[in-house]
Amino acid sequence: MKQLLGIILLFVSLGLYAQDMTVTGTVTDASNGEPVPGVAVVIKGTTIGTATDIDGTYSIETSMNSVLIYSFLGMKTEERTVTSSVIDVILSPMVTDLDEVVVTGYGIQKKALTTGANQNIKGEEIAELNTSTAMEALQGITPGVSVTRTNGQPGAGTEVVIRGMGTIGNASPLYIVDGVTVGSIDYLNPSDIESIDILKDAASAAIYGSRAANGVILVTTTKGKRGAKPVIRYDTYYGIQNIYKNLTPLNAQEYMYIMDEGRVNDGLQPYDWETMLTNNSWLNNNYPDDLGTQLGQEIWSKLQGGWKGTNWINELTKENAPVVSHSLSVTGGTQDIAYSVGFSYLDHTGIIAGDLIGAGQKRMTARINTEFTLVKNDDFDIIKVGENFTYNSNINRSVGTGNIYWNDLHDALVINPIMPAYWDKSPDPNGFTPILEGLSNNQTNPLATCFYRHNYGWYNGNNIAGNVYVEIQPIEDLVIRSSYGIDAWFGHGRSWSPTYALGTLYTNPKDAANQSMWFGNSWTLTNTVTYNHIFGGEH
């Protein structure tokens, strides 16, 4: 018992020795010299701490050479190494954050003076994530904003909901790019974005009226800088895509075993797989000249040799589907001109049918932003003109999504693994040699359905969005601005469907061709008068 007590006392003495001195001091504000109450003073690496009192003073037990952290909301955090018993600290206000400006409707305002629920995302944050669209980059980094894809195909649109559903019908926010109302911002190259401002509450978005009932997303594209030397920037990345948590279906041997077990559990005899394959009425009806029997015999022979069958998920999907992006931009300016031009190219291969039909997206984007000073005096520009335009070309080749019972992936899950994916004797007039059906009329080879229904089609969509503007500043701080913006879209698509019969699920008795065209535009005329002056150095 004495030995145990001695050990306990030893531990206590060591703990007391670790805090062998008392540090006191005062924390003051660098801007006015006043004491700052409520400052947290914590020993670094521990949860031991205290706070300054009403006079800004503190006292804490610590040890020599430990580090104290001083933190207070709205001020820069400071650290001090303990080398004496008295440490006075001066905290500086976080001027950068308080003076930061945010976009509010048609103007800008200091962040410190903004009470609305707004959020600003810098272009650097978006570019670092290497996403194919700007909206994908906002996933997970914007509180209160839900961003989802309409489907998983490359080039699919995004659905954005700010603070929950605002209406029974369409809950999409209002998108504004450089002052122009657009239907979506998916056409933008993420590297061309300077900032995104999200206006979440009614007070911030009220200036846009009923259009902003579900929030506003304001996008500012990259601009040039007056008097700056030309800056050439090239960004590129390469990535691969795979199915997250891929399914592992039964192989042929496992499939036959499970099916036989089901028969036995029902009090029946196991299947006679040899007869089912070599004398299958369904195969004989769909393959002429005894080809059905030949196919069944070949399958049975392969199964006897230990063949594991077909993994239809692997056959339909592409492993390590690539995504490649290139972006080139030039920005700069003179005393009277600011310019920024950019070009980008995205090649996004689809995971489903990426090899089979080349499913995926190819997007090309060109952007130009310029501003010219026409008249100026010694203090400010009197007349400025400028424009911001982005052109986008999008070529999509997609697979069928349909519903849960009507899409290529569903077909891959339904068909049994006994059938091979291809057969060189398959009677196909188009030169494609997939197995057309399964062992019954409700099973269809997903490779055949995908090829025949989607291989012969593509769509090319184009979009031009931008504005031209003039700014007149008759006197200092007063700016009159008139802007004409347009969002125009046009495109065309072609598809051809050959004659095929894929069981009873998918049939096309004759060749069919289809061509479509679409176009439309919207324009916006905006006139604003802004007076921005600081009175008395504070307002």
Image (cartoon, rainbow, N blue to C red):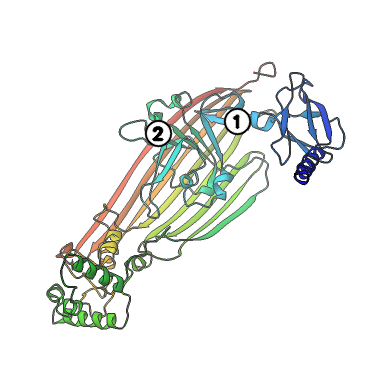
Choose between 257 and 283: the one closer to the eye: 257
Disc 2, SS = loop
Is residue 220 visible to the viewer in this orientation of the structure?
A: yes
Disc 1 element: strand
Quadrant of the rendered structure where residue 297 is? bottom left
Tell me the quarter of the picture where residue 364 sits.
bottom left
Whether residue 271 sits left or right of residue 390 in the image: it is left
The quadrant of the picture occupied by the N terminus is: top right
Does the CB distance between marks 2 and 1 fall below 8 Å? no
* Residue 236 drawn at (x, y percent): 55, 58
Q: Specify few, some or many for label 1: CA neighbours under 10 Å numbering under 14, 14-19, or 20 or more.
A: some
- The residue depicted at 64 percent of the width and 38 percent of the height is 336
Q: Which residue is mark 1?
A: 101
Judge by depth and name the residue closer to the eye, 508 or 478: 508
| 320 sits to left or right of 257 | right
Residue 29 versus residue 13 in the image, above or below: above
The image position of residue 270, as x and y in percent, is 19, 73
Q: Earlier in the sequence, mark 2 or mark 1?
A: 1
Q: Residue 148 got which mark?
A: none
Q: Amino acid at mark 1?
A: Val
- The answer to whether 446 is drawn above or below residue 122 in the figure is below
Q: Nearer the viewer, mark 2 or mark 1?
A: 2
Residue at the (26%, 60%) spot, across then down: 495
Q: Position of residue 70 (x, y in %)?
A: 74, 32
> Which of the image's four quarters has the C terminus?
top right
Residue 394 is situated, as x and y percent measured from the top left of the image, at 40, 53
112 vs 64: above or below: above
Which residue lies under the disc numbered 2? Answer: 164
Query: Viewed as shown, does residue 223 lie left or right of 494?
Result: right
Query: Who is closer to the viewer here, 410 or 238?
Result: 410
Residue type beneath disc 2? Gly
